[in-house]
Image (cartoon, helix red, strand yellow):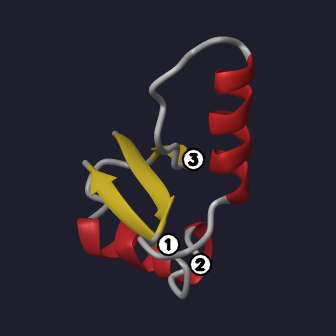
């Protein structure tokens, strides 16, 4: 079973990587990009029967820094 976890910085947390991408896009001539937020996508190949609660625990303990990041699970 493939599970995807999308991890993003919470609103209000500075995103220097996203800002660097926004700046680079402007330098390449792509105008109108007002904001870029960069995150990560983690794809897990898990055994059938793995519950969403188990994946949530994985996120809370390792995959996301819940102080500054939020996550979304796609089962």
Tell me the residue at 72%/57% (across/down): 16
* Label 3 secondary element: loop
Real-space Cα distance between discs 2 and 1?
11 Å
> What residue does disc 1 label?
58
> Could you say which quadrant of the image residue 26 lies in?
top right
Tag 1 and tag 3, C-beta contact below 8 Å? no
Q: Badge 1: few (under 14), some or many (20 or more) residues near its Cα, within 10 Å?
A: few
Q: Where is residue 36 in the image (x, y as percent from the top left)?
A: 52, 43
Q: Badge 3: few (under 14), some or many (20 or more) residues near its Cα, within 10 Å?
A: some
> What residue does disc 2 label?
65
* Label 2 secondary element: loop
Tell me the residue at 48%/81% (across/down): 60
Residue 1 versus residue 16 in the image, above or below: above
* Label 1 secondary element: helix
Left or right: 18 as drawn, with respect to 67: right
Q: Position of residue 9 (x, y in %)?
A: 52, 66
Along the viewing direction, whichever of 74 and 1 lies nearer the viewer: 74
**Which mark, by number, is residue 27?**
none
Real-space Cα distance between discs 2 and 3?
15 Å
Which circle, 2 or 1, is nearer the viewer?
2
Tag 2 and tag 1, C-beta contact below 8 Å? no
Total numbered circles: 3
In primary-sequence order, the first of circles 1 and 3 is: 3
In primary-sequence order, the first of circles 2 and 3 is: 3
Left or right: 40 as drawn, with respect to 12: right
> What residue does disc 3 label?
38
Which circle, 2 or 3, is nearer the viewer?
3
Tell me the residue at 30%/48% (across/down): 48
Q: Where is residue 65 in the image (x, y as percent from the top left)?
A: 59, 78
Tell me the residue at 41%/71% (across/down): 11
């Amino acid at each position: 079973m493939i599970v995807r976890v999308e991890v993003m910085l919470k609103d209000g947390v500075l995103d220097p990587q996203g800002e660097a991408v926004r700046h680079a896009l402007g330098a390449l001539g792509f105008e109108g990009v007002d904001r870029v937020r960069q995150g990560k996508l983690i794809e897990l190949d898990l055994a059938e029967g793995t519950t969403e609660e188990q994946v949530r625990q994985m996120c809370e303990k390792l995959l996301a820094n819940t102080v500054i990041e939020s996550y979304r699970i796609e089962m």
